[in-house]
Amino acid sequence: MEWDEELDAQGLLCPLPVLKARKRLKPMAQGAVLRVLATDPAAVIDIPHFCAEAKHMLVDSGEIGAAQYYLIRKG
């Protein structure tokens, strides 16, 4: 899947990956996709929860090496 913007949050700990994702998504057009790269173990819980609370759609997630990726479609 393709994405419109990417946020590299590797090395950042909770709550920074979610806070930076929220800030990056704010100016993006509705329906645009943000790919977040994170190494924080809590991101597995935090990012899906953030998406549900903020009415964004978690399109896909998985691992790339030591990092996780999350594809978030802005709601």
Image (cartoon, helix red, strand yellow):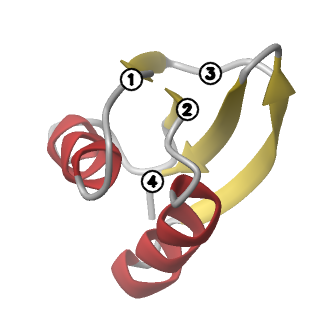
Amino acid type shown at disc 3: Trp
Point out the frontmost of discs 2 and 3: 2
Separation of disc 2 and disc 1 at Cα?
6 Å
State yes or no: discs 3 and 1 in contact (Cβ < 8 Å): no
- 14 vs 47, left or right, is left
Q: Position of residue 3 (x, y in %)?
A: 62, 21
Determine which residue is flagged by label 2.
39
Quadrant occupied by the C terminus: bottom left
Neighbour tally class for label 2: few under 14, some 14-19, many 20 plus, Cα within 10 Å = many
Separation of disc 4 and disc 1 at Cα?
24 Å
Of the pair 53 and 43, the residue shown nearer to us? 43
Determine which residue is flagged by label 4.
74
User: Is 66 situated above or below 73?
Assistant: above
Q: Position of residue 38 (x, y in %)?
A: 52, 32
First in residue order: circle 2 vs circle 3: 3
Determine which residue is flagged by label 3.
3
Quadrant occupied by the N terminus: top right
Amino acid type shown at disc 4: Lys
Point out the frontmost of discs 4 and 1: 1
Amino acid type shown at disc 1: Gly
Of the pair 52 and 69, the residue shown nearer to us? 69
User: Is 32 situated above or below 73?
Assistant: above
Determine which residue is flagged by label 1.
11
- 29 vs 65, left or right, is left
Q: Position of residue 66 (x, y in %)?
A: 74, 20
First in residue order: circle 2 vs circle 1: 1
Amino acid type shown at disc 2: Thr
State yes or no: discs 2 and 1 in contact (Cβ < 8 Å): yes
